[in-house]
Image (cartoon, rainbow, N blue to C red):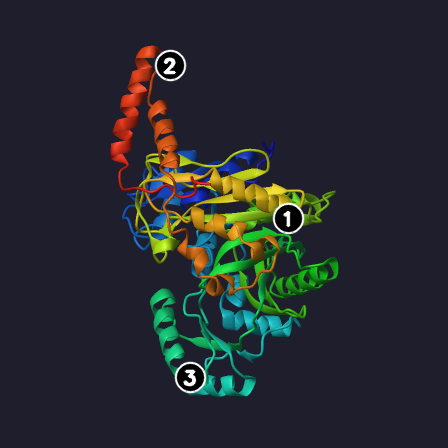
Amino acid sequence: MSHNPPFRRLLIANRGEIAVRIARGLREMGIESVAVHSDIDARCAHVLAADHAMALGGNTAAESYLDIGKILAAAKKSGAEAIHPGYGFLSENAAFARAVRDAGLVFVGPTPEAMERLGGKKAAREEAIAAGVPVIPGTEQDLGDAGLIEVAKKIGMPVMVKASAGGGGRGMRLVEREQDLAEALQAGRREAKASFGDDRMILERAVFPARHIEIQLIGDKHGHVVSLHERECSVQRRHQKVLEEAPSAVVDEALRKRMGDAAVSLAKRVGYDNAGTAEFLLDPQGNFYFLEVNTRLQVEHPVTELVTGVDLVHLQVHVAAGGKLEQLLAGKDLRPRGHSIEARICAESPETGYIPAAGLLRLVREAEGPGIRVDSGVYTGWDVPPFYDSMLAKLIVWAPDRATACARLSQALRDTAYLGIPTNVDFLRRIVDDTAFRSARLRTDMLKLRPELAEGPKEPPEDLALAAAVLCQAMAKQPSASSGAASGVAAGSVAAWQDLQGFRVFGGAS
């Protein structure tokens, strides 16, 4: 615990696993945490993990976590001095950052001015060009459908059409034939308008096969920016990351320095002063091209923490309070040590088309042991709501080398089970056990080219896995281990088994 915490009380404007993770970091710093929640999230894990909780009302994101007025009112009422936005929701909303500052509170993130200069793909591309960072041939202007089609013809097919204001793969299309461009642009505009309220599109030449490499940045309010090196995020589904790791198996010291220098140069140009990530595509020849900047803490930040030994949430809070990186990182060797891999565990069924799931988690069993970290937002008995992102938890491993990290993650996924709703645990294990993944032959379209990884085995998991999990649940309910209780265990097992008819164990079968 810090003897001189930079804040007394901080509000977390988020939910689920990231809010739990931030609350834990604040407690280590001696800072009180304030959770906010919708009505349906009143008993969510992040509410239970925080020191204080404030109800926002409503259930949907628009009624709660995206309502700037409600969040600022909660901060004022709770006596919070600062607000941490986590990721998603309002984390990259410059208007929110400005409103926090105007309310006399500290925003734990970059300034709204830096966010505006890097937040949109068009603006970020222009800043990258000005900073001398390599960009993919294309246009950062929406020239209208006809104009964009002409650019595509000039730079050559295939191309990527992207929502200018977008992220998370929304509004993005890979187009391989000129005759498909018009339809792709129209579909992209519709999706972008629905997702971001902005239907502007840009266009770039498609780089593939490619790897997705990103650089973790941290800046302070005194003009210092440090690269905490790369993460590889090439395993993706529809431009959404599935597995992430650090360091990348194909990035050597020379390339690491070149990419880090480029990212730092861009961040310094806009006066960036908190955690952020510069994302790049890397082609087979070793050329890298700027994609975008995520002006927030990333979902995959734990793998960087495990290989560098720094706590990014601690750093975020310290620099938001005016701390200097040269002091905060003094004496630290930031070179990557060992290897870390993260798997995003989601309430969805890859075997049936990735349909998001909601409902009661009857039993949660999360992996533990040496080199294993679980950032979780759920618990046994939690009713997963249908209103938010499907991610339940993140399973992260560390090992001295990549091969050992892969083996550790595979076993950890076998030790993981969420009973009651479908999850992607088995799917993640199939990827980790795949020969291409084990040999680090990764590319952004890997899962598209290997649909069988999502399909899974034709036979369901063995009943033994379900029986063992149900028995554990039944035994946990018994008050003692007496002979009388033993018969109760058997009866409880039968009752629990009947309760769980129709539910499938994902990840329990080896």
Q: Position of residue 262 (x, y in %)?
A: 67, 65
Disc assigned to residue 144? 3
Q: Quadrant of residue 292?
A: bottom right
Name the residue furthest front: 459
Mark with earlier residue (1, 2): 1
Answer few, some or many: residues within 10 Å of disc 3's Cα (few below 14, many 20 plus, some between 14 and 19).
few
Q: Considering depth in this image, is 190 or 177 the residue closer to the camera?
A: 177
Q: Quadrant of residue 472?
A: top left
Disc assigned to residue 302? none
The Cα atoms of the two marked residues, 2 and 3, are separated by 73 Å
Mark with earlier residue (2, 3): 3
| Amino acid marked by disc 2 | Ala
Question: Are discs 1 and 3 less than 8 Å apart at CB?
Answer: no
Q: Secondary structure at mark 3?
A: helix
Q: Considering depth in this image, is 250 or 410 the residue closer to the camera?
A: 410
Query: What residue would you read off at disc 1?
Result: 402
The Cα atoms of the two marked residues, 1 and 3, are separated by 46 Å
| Left or right: where 463 falls relative to 12 | left
Mark with earlier residue (1, 3): 3
Measuring 33% from the left and 39% from the top, which residue is drawn there? 361
Image quadrant occupied by the N terminus: top right
Answer few, some or many: residues within 10 Å of disc 2's Cα (few below 14, many 20 plus, some between 14 and 19).
few
Measuring 60% from the left and 73% from the top, which residue is drawn there? 135
| Amino acid marked by disc 3 | Gly
Answer few, some or many: residues within 10 Å of disc 1's Cα (few below 14, many 20 plus, some between 14 and 19).
many
Q: Position of residue 407 (x, y in %)?
A: 58, 43
Q: Is residue 23 above or below residue 192?
A: above
Question: Are discs 1 and 2 less than 8 Å apart at CB?
Answer: no
Q: Position of residue 229 (x, y in %)?
A: 66, 55
Q: Nearer the viewer, mark 2 or mark 3?
A: 2
